[in-house]
């Protein structure tokens, strides 16, 4: 990945891998763009640009199918993300979304969708500085076209379209190291259905461990422990959003959400995102936990097709211990039929990972800022979860 990929990134406004950024530097790499390209970048012969209408069921299905068959896989090609259509609508249509930022590449002849990339707006704060931004996601090229060098053109074209709206910074994540991460976070996994996880080789029985003992090790209560923990409602949004905004100000990289954005991202959606709150006697939210549903296709397994995974989202605890709150999140996820609960070691997550029996995964997630130079930071100072 490194050589060819880095040749492209060396042409982009990103810090170099070898660059040593002083702690007091926090600024755009290109302060002002004098001229923005008006015409789209040229694609190789046989391909054409296409704005994808996510509200059109058949086009949403095209994006779903492209991602389901060609998007992120583990290194052993055993599991591949399977974003649902409902999840994609949630991820791609936050307040302020623009249709021209849902960008596809089609074959000129058959008009089939062969590649995709997206941008959504976000008010990102980097070390106390508010920067109008987009979050880049779902960069996907059909497996048979990986030699066509479509990914760099997709990145250039979505950048051009974002520039046309007066936004010149972006954030994104990747499982690979590119020039240059602001932080490297690690995935942790908490078994909820250990028997299935072993059967599909997501995890393994250690020497001297029996399946019976493993199941007992990860067993959870049937009901949450905390009194008053309940699903979040629209009435909770103002106080819960303020709670999150206050909490995230201690982070080096985070999204400041308006009440409207918070409602979009955190209010429960069946099969997509779950959020639970504790409120005081005046109805003000004092604690909340949340997780989203991102299953993976289990590739070529005789018994199972789907790994049901919950991912830790945003969690804030002020009246109870975070560990106790997250233990209830595990209980709720287990009751909802999830097989595994995943979490990155960002924000304050490290406070509960060991005690709640999370195991360290073998995957890292790198966080990047585009056209912004700042010193690298630690996972505990990352307050942003990208889907």
Image (cartoon, rainbow, N blue to C red):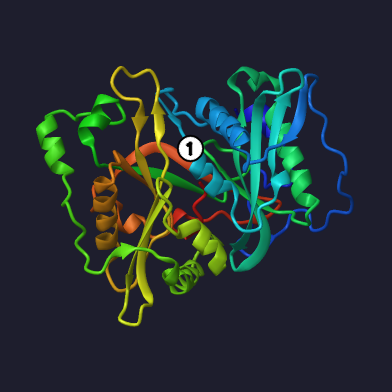
Snapshot quadrant of residue 113: top right
Q: Residue furthest front?
A: 57
Horizontal side of 243 relative to 340 (left or right) equals right
Mark 1 residue crowding within 10 angstroms, few (<14) / some (14–19) / many (20+): many
Relative height, residue 348 to residue 278 (above, below):
above
Horizontal side of 310 relative to 75 (left or right) equals left
Asked whether 270 or 66 is in front, the reply is 270
Q: Residue at x 35, y 33 (%)?
A: 307
Snapshot quadrant of residue 317: bottom left
Report the quarter where the N terminus lies. top right
What residue sits right under mark 1 in the picture? 83
Q: Secondary structure at mark 1?
A: loop
Q: Residue 173: x and y, percent?
A: 56, 44
Relative height, residue 132 to residue 284 (above, below):
above
Q: Residue at x 68, y 61 (%)?
A: 132
Q: Is residue 257 visible in this depiction of the protein?
A: no
Q: Is residue 163 visible in this depiction of the protein?
A: yes
Q: Residue 195: x and y, percent?
A: 20, 31
Asked whether 205 or 258 is in front, the reply is 258
Q: Residue at x 54, y 42 (%)?
A: 88
Horizontal side of 333 relative to 346 (left or right) equals left
Relative height, residue 365 to residue 41 (above, below):
below
**Number of disc labels:** 1
Q: Residue at x 44, y 74 (%)?
A: 239
Q: Residue 82: x and y, percent?
A: 46, 33
Horizontal side of 267 relative to 2 (left or right) equals left
Q: Residue furthest bottom?
A: 282
Relative height, residue 3 to residue 311 (above, below):
above
Snapshot quadrant of residue 338: top left
Q: Residue 109: x and y, percent?
A: 76, 18
């Amino acid at each position: 990945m490194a050589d060819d990929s880095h040749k492209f990134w060396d042409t982009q406004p990103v810090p170099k891998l070898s660059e040593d950024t002083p702690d007091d530097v926090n600024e755009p790499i290109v302060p002002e763009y004098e001229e923005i390209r008006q015409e789209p970048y040229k694609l190789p012969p046989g391909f054409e640009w296409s704005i994808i209408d996510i509200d059109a069921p058949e086009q949403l299905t095209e994006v779903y199918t492209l991602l389901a068959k060609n998007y992120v896989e583990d290194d052993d090609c055993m599991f591949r993300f399977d974003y649902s259509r409902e999840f994609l609508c949630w991820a791609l249509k936050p307040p302020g979304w623009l249709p021209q930022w849902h960008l596809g590449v089609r074959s000129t002849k058959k008009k089939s969708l062969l590649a995709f990339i997206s941008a959504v707006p976000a008010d990102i704060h980097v070390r106390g500085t508010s920067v109008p931004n987009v979050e880049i996601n779902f960069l996907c090229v059909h497996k048979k076209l990986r030699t066509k060098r479509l990914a760099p053109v997709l990145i250039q074209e979505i950048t051009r379209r974002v520039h046309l709206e007066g936004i010149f910074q972006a954030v994104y994540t990747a499982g690979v190291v590119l020039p240059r991460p602001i932080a490297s976070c690690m995935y942790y996994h908490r078994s909820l259905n250990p028997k299935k996880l072993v059967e599909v080789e997501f995890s393994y029985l250690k020497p001297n461990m029996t399946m019976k003992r493993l199941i007992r090790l990860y067993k959870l209560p049937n009901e949450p422990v905390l009194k008053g923990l309940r699903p979040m409602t629209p009435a909770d949004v103002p106080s819960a959003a303020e709670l999150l905004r206050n909490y995230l100000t201690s982070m080096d990289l985070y999204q400041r959400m308006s009440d409207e954005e918070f409602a979009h991202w955190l209010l429960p959606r069946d099969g997509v995102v779950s959020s639970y709150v504790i409120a005081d006697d005046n109805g003000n939210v004092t604690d909340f936990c949340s997780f989203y549903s991102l299953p993976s296709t289990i590739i070529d397994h005789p018994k199972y097709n789907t790994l049901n995974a919950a991912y830790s989202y945003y969690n804030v605890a002020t009246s109870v211990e975070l560990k106790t709150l997250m233990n209830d999140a595990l209980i709720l996820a287990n009751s909802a039929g999830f097989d595994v609960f995943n979490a990155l070691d960002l924000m304050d997550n490290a406070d509960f990972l060991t005690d709640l029996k999370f195991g360290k995964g073998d995957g890292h997630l790198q966080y990047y800022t585009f056209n912004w130079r700042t010193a690298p930071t630690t996972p505990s100072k990352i307050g942003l979860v990208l889907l």
